[in-house]
Image (cartoon, helix red, strand yellow):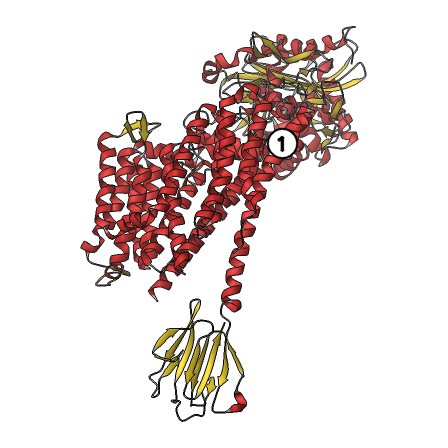
Amino acid sequence: MLNIVMIALQYILLFIICFFIYKIMKAVYKDLHQAAYSSDTAGKKAALIIIDSYDENIISNKINFTTSVSIGRGSENDIVLTDNYVSHHHATINAFKNQYQLEDLHSRNCTYVNDEAVNKIFLQNGDIVKIGNTSFRFER
Amino acid sequence: MRDDNINKNIFRIAQVFIVLFVILLINLSYIQIVKSDWYTNNSLNARIINRENSILRGDIIDSTGKKLVYSEKQNNEIKRMYPYGEICAFPIGYFGKNIGSAGIEQTQNIDLAGLNMTMHKLGPIEQLFEGKKGNTIKLTLDVNLQKTAWNAIGQRRGAAVVMDADTGAVLVMASRPAFNPNTINEDWDKLRNDKNSPLINRAAQGLYPPGSSIKPLIADAALQQKIISPDTRINCGPFYDLGNGQKIYEADKATYGNINLDEGLIHSSNVMFAGLAVKLGNKELQQAFSRFGFYDKVKSDFYTQTPHMPDFGKLSTGETAQVGIGQADLLVTPLRMAMLAEAFINQGKIMQPYLVDSVQTLDGVTIRTTSPTLFKEATDVNRAELINSYMADVVKKGTGKNAHVNGIEIAGKTGTAENSQGADHAWFMGTACVKGRNIAFAVILENSGFGGAEAAPIIKQIITTMLREDYDV
Amino acid sequence: MGHLKKNVLLMPSYMLIIGTLIAYLQKKTAVVTSDIIFIVAASFLFFLIPWGIKKYNKNIDEYILSLVIFLCSMSLIMLLRLKVSLFKPQMEWIGLGLVLMLLTIVFSAQLLKLLEYPYLLGLASILIIFLVVVFGTEIGGNRNWIIMGPFQVQPSEYAKLLVLGFLTAYLQENKNLLNLPNRKWGFLYLPPLRFLAPLIMIWSMALLMFVYQRDLGSALLFFGMAVMMTYVATSNKSYMFLAAVFFILSGFASYMAFGHVRVRFDIWLNPWADPMGKAYQIVQSLFALGYGGLFGAGYWHGFPDMIPAVQTDFIFSAIGEEFGLLGVLSVITAYLLIFFRAMKISFSCSDEKYKLLSFGLSATMLLQAFIILAGVTKLLPLTGITLPFISYGGSSMTASFITIGLLLAIGAKEKNRA
């Protein structure tokens, strides 16, 4: 009887050793997976919502993007604003690590974030970006 | 972008590490899975010795149940006892402390140690199946016959093998000089440096030129190739002329006149067999040796040496003639000669020789029994019987007279082998039917002179022992 | 961020408790009451430490910490079995190590400031090596010990950390210079000699240890460390090539010149030439591993005492004998996982110095494990070096804990910043 208990204990000990490593391995893998997943989509999912514009038709439109978006009068931009106050290449928003950076491309009439003229700035959720006559709300 | 460079480099180093650890793991798996049995059973692995403290090592008994080896507790120390000492040193071997082990003690180590390899592979569960004592190994050896052979060899260097011709079971495997397994640890250095090699089992591992005792094989080959028929007569003068001044003489430069194959064997005519070998040619000779298994390894429960064969592709006529009388580069073990003889009494079949009869647990339950297996289908029944009858004539009328025992059909062939170490080796090999049991045997005495005079009487003594009333076959 | 469940964190403590139980059932005299108090305390400590540290600073990498705790439990149960007299001292060393680790984390900012003074670190490590050369005492064939009163210290374990710090700081500051290709020899691009001098010094230091102290393992480790760090910092493969040539040449020269190197090498090539003499250790180690098989003979049911130095250099073989391939696989995986987690920390570092340092610390630990594991399995010639967190020894244990402390501190710092 004692013999069987001993043998069982020895197997349990070996099992615990292997099981512990397995658990940690799984957790580490999960952690990596999560990190990979969030950096692809969840972490890099942002949107600009138009809250005010020269063109009433586009108000409350939502523009989703993940890595970058360019804004300007030129038709090659992702968001084209046919507004005289907007420069040809007005501004871009780029994902940088885990953040989104707005960069004004030396536009004539500047880019405003929360009513302040900016050159380069990291956007926070809910920031109001004003370009020409159009206002966007940044969401992520 | 420098930053990314460092990350990339770190990644590369990590890849190198992964490769290194994969190699490490492959090596570990190789050690722990593939080679596990080998390391566990290695004779230098003292783990088995240490197990003796909890599990007594099993006994080794002979075919009649006499204890040849057992373990005993003496003053809190477990000692391995060998009551027959040197007599059974071969084939039983020894179980040393730091010198490893040998013989049956080594090859049957797992069973003697009570190790259950299947259970051992499954880990701690093995402990559940551990007995108080290892398994008992029952040998086919007969210690009475072994003792007779040992005493008959006397102070000479030599070996004797007797096998059951129908099964291949080894009844006698004596080799002298030997060691005393009881004191092997203390004697080790002396034994290792002894010029007479007392640690070598001459019966299974000693290589010697067979001399004339190879002639039955040549006779078989010549009959098979129809180079000679039983009635053919050949003039056997004092010598066989090889042409370029080389001559092979009869023993004592005798002249036998026109004799047939039977008489050729009776007189052990060198002229006849040198001639037959030359007529057979190298290719046919090689095939004959191959038929009798001289090129095959014996894989058994004891270690054997495979014969050293001449390079038949490159032999000159003179050397071919020498092979016919068992000289040239041909080297064989006594066990092989007994196996050769076995073919002639066992309808042309050679059985796989073996020493372990069965393995029994402490409670007497037999775990496994060796079943005889065929080693080689050497020759056909007719030729075998014919040659065996010729060999019987050798004992009745020829060079083997000294082996004769009244009322017993003994067949044999003597050999007197020239060698580089000095005086000729004396050989005697053959078969007999004792109390209905067919046996095959071979004896060698190193540097002892004539086979008929020296080696044949040893067989006579063994057979006499077998004939004693109390001896039960 | 997934959190480890409580029952996973409890497992190293379970290991200790079951190990003790088996030890007690096997041999009633093996475990005395005071040991049991120690073991209970240790089991609590092993559970509370990762949990408590997590509470103190949530950015600390809990995986690394629990893996270290696992290795320590492994060490303790093996010592309980191999040499019970070393069990309590090892327990104390682990306790001291944990305290040092916590202190390292708390004072990490100050410690990491030392990276601003590379030459100070360099000088300090040279001083330590010099001290060993002058005052070193030979223990177990290696003249790399210094005896201070009741303590025996293996300074090379700490010198390792200083050299790592020096390499980090020096390479980060000078990597652009080191990559200036103004000397071209064949296909090698090398900077002027004066920029190379400190690296050559470290390499020579390794060689000095190798030759004078017979400490082949540390020499190999220092050498590998310097090569890895140089490559990672400069991306210059010419250094790798140069190092390989240097290594082969010095290896060959020492084989020719020194008997003990020759003996070790010959043992490695053919241990079966003298299995009961010179090659006794490695042959016994192979027997132990082979006897273990896949599942092992069972805790307390192998015969690891036959291997000399089993509690230090050969503890891995004892694990292999009693826990089998599965057990050693777990241990190896633990080291690899620590390295991978540390790799993640270095990737997240924005400061190159921290990036280099965290890489260096973890890679050195992994390399150390590899050198000794390859040694006891006859993959490489055997070099006496400890297995981090498992082998018995205070210097090794405390130095390893400081290493982990630095890693955790850097990791927490970077995460905090992000």
- The front one of B4 and B394 is B4
Q: Residue visible at 34% across and 54% down?
A: C354
Q: Which residue is mark 1?
A: A9
Q: Is residue B102 visible?
A: no
Residue B222 % position (x, y): 69, 33
Asked which quadrant contains residue C24, the reply is: top right
**Residue B356 falls left or right of residue C279:** right
In this rendering, the answer to whether C384 lies above or below A110 is above
Chain identity of mark 1: A
Q: Check the picture and name the quadrant holding the N terminus of chain A.
A: top right
Residue at far left of view: C194
Label 1 neighbourhood size at 10 Å, few (<14), some (14-19), many (20+)?
Answer: some
**Residue B115 falls left or right of residue B8:** right
In this rendering, the answer to whether B213 lies above or below A67 is above
Residue at far bottom of view: A84
- The front one of C93 and B312 is C93
**Residue B292 falls left or right of residue B243:** right
Asked which quadrant contains residue B391, the reply is: top right
- The front one of B139 and B303 is B139
Q: Residue visible at 61% across and 32% down?
A: A10
Residue A74 % position (x, y): 42, 90
Q: Amino acid at mark 1?
A: Leu
Q: Residue visible at 49% across and 22% down?
A: B420
Residue B399 % position (x, y): 67, 15
- Counting labels gives 1
Q: Is residue C180 visible?
A: yes
